[in-house]
Image: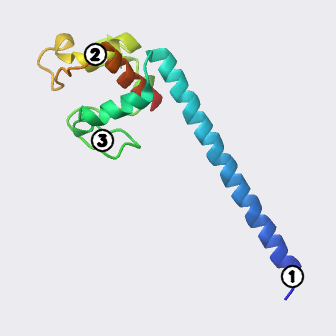
């Protein structure tokens, strides 16, 4: 049975919606990739490795971070938008060196705070900083 004009019009409209959805998804992926590249350049680290470290070091046990399923902790502050904050821990200007230092040795910055020193190399702390900056 041949298609009516109405069915053809609906079919074309559905195809147009699918094409638009694919284009939007592609633009979002491109924006995420661009943010990650900028974060890595700023922090001097590898955000992909930083994401692995975030899980391995158990950061999500104390912090929340949108888009990271294992990050549901309520001890420390949410880590969403870390890259947009002016200060880290209310004491340090937010820059890659300070964030990497805070990640590695927060007890030297604010003795007695709830965040433990995390044994890791300076490069690992830069990778973790790049990951956090890549999340916005």
Looking at the image, is 62 positioned above or below residue 17?
above
**Mark before the other along the chain sequence, 3 or 1:** 1
> 40 or 95: which is nearer to us?
40
Q: Name which quarter of the figure residue 103 lies in.
A: top left
Callout 2 crowding tier (Cα within 10 Å): few <14, some 14–19, many ≥20:
few
Which residue in the rendered view is the most extreme toward the bottom? 1
Residue 95 seen anywhere in this rendered image of the structure? no
Determine whether 71 is above or below 135 in the image: below
Tell me what residue is drawn at x 31 percent, y 12 percent: 92
| Residue 3 seen by the camera | yes
19 vs 8: above or below: above
Question: Within 10 angstroms of label 3, few (less than 14), some, or many (20 or more) residues?
Answer: many
The residue singled out by tag 1 in the image is: 4
**N-term-proximal mark, 1 vs 2:** 1
Q: Nearer the viewer, residue 77 or 108?
A: 108
Relative image position of residue 23 (x, y in whole percent):
69, 47
Looking at the rendered image, the disc whose residue lies closer to the viewer, 2 or 3, is 2
Percent x, y for residue 12?
81, 66
**Residue receiving disc 3:** 71
How many labels were placed on the picture? 3
SS of the residue at dot 2? loop
Kindly identify which numbered label has been placed on residue 132: none
Q: Label for residue 121? A: 2
74 vs 125, left or right, is left
Name the residue at 40% across, 17% down.
86
- Residue 99: x and y, percent? 34, 17
Residue occupying image coordinates x 38% and y 22%: 127
Disc 1 to disc 2, C-alpha distance? 67 Å
């Amino acid at each position: 049975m041949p298609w009516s004009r109405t069915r053809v019009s609906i079919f074309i409209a559905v195809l147009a919606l699918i094409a638009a959805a694919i284009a939007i998804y592609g633009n979002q992926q491109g924006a995420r990739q661009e943010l990650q590249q900028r974060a890595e350049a700023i922090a001097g680290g590898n955000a992909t490795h930083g994401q692995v470290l975030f899980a391995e070091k158990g950061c999500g046990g104390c912090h929340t971070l949108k888009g990271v399923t294992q990050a549901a902790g309520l001890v420390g502050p949410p880590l969403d938008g870390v890259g947009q904050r002016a200060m880290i821990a209310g004491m340090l200007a937010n820059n890659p060196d300070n964030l990497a230092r805070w990640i590695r040795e927060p007890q030297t910055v604010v003795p007695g705070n709830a965040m433990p020193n995390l044994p890791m190399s300076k490069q690992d702390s830069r990778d973790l900083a790049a990951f956090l900056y890549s999340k916005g």
